[in-house]
Image (cartoon, grey):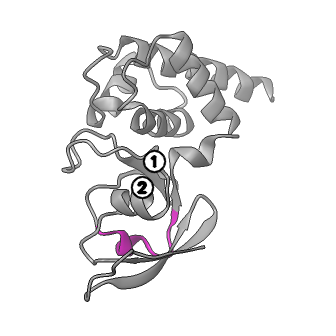
Amino acid sequence: MSVELEFPAADAVRFTLEVNGQAREVTAEPRTHLADVLREHCGLTATHLGCEQGVCGACTVQVDGEPVRACLQSASRFAGRDIRTLEAFDDDPLGEALRRAFSEEHALQCGYCTPGMLITARDIVTRLPDADEARIREELAGNLCRCTGYRGIVRAIARVLETHRHETTDGR
């Protein structure tokens, strides 16, 4: 899939990103950060922009299996890397479990931080299967939520961690 700027700037560069398992050819100005390319060039709007300084975590995506702030670096730096936005986890069982737990634990209010929270939560569950509440809170420190007070978010992640631990030890 090729995505073009309507009126490319004279200094625009062309590069290919691997986004959600699909090669995307992009033409953008060198300073265009990954979050803008994902939203404006690829139509993947789950990646939200908040502070645009890497502080709030709303723009968190997964790059090569790790959470990354998409607002901090130029998109062209990510050529050849595996980028996954929240949309990539639509059919993922762990993603589904997290979405369900977030809903049931009232971890959602306005929803603006939710995509970044879900990407971070997925990382916590896969990387830290024995995380307790304190560790979950520590891992969430880079994701800001102004609505929930974090209790529901922490409970949702803890619930999925517990289920995930039982599934792993039971051999499911």
Three-letter code, disc 1? Thr
Task: Estimate the x, y position of residue 95 in percent, counting from the top left.
Answer: 61, 34
The residue lying at 42 percent from left, 84 percent from top is: 14
Q: Which residue is mark 1?
A: 45
- Whole-number angstrom distance, CA of label 1 to CA of label 2: 5 Å
Q: Is residue 114 above or below residue 149?
A: below
Binning the other alpha carbons within 10 Å of mark 1 as few (below 14), some (14 to 19) or many (20 upward) gives some
- Marks 1 and 2 in Cβ contact (< 8 Å): yes
Mark drawn on residue 73: none
Three-letter code, disc 2? Arg
User: Quick one: SS at disc 1?
Assistant: loop
The residue lying at 64 percent from left, 24 percent from top is: 165
Q: Quadrant of the C terminus?
A: top right
In this rendering, position of residue 18 left or right of residue 112: right
- Magenta range: 74-82
Task: Estimate the x, y position of residue 93 in percent, counting from the top left.
Answer: 70, 34
Tell me which corner region of the image, top left, top right, bottom left or bottom right, holds residue 133.
top left
Does the magenta-highlighted stretch encompass residue 79? yes
Q: Is residue 20 above or below residue 9?
A: above
Task: Estimate the x, y position of residue 146 in percent, counting from the top left.
Answer: 25, 22
User: Quick one: SS at disc 2?
Assistant: helix
Q: Which residue is mark 2?
A: 39
Task: Estimate the x, y position of residue 2 in percent, counting from the top left.
Answer: 55, 76
In this rendering, position of residue 142 left or right of residue 90: left
The residue lying at 52 percent from left, 54 percent from top is: 65
In this rendering, position of residue 75 left or right of residue 41: left
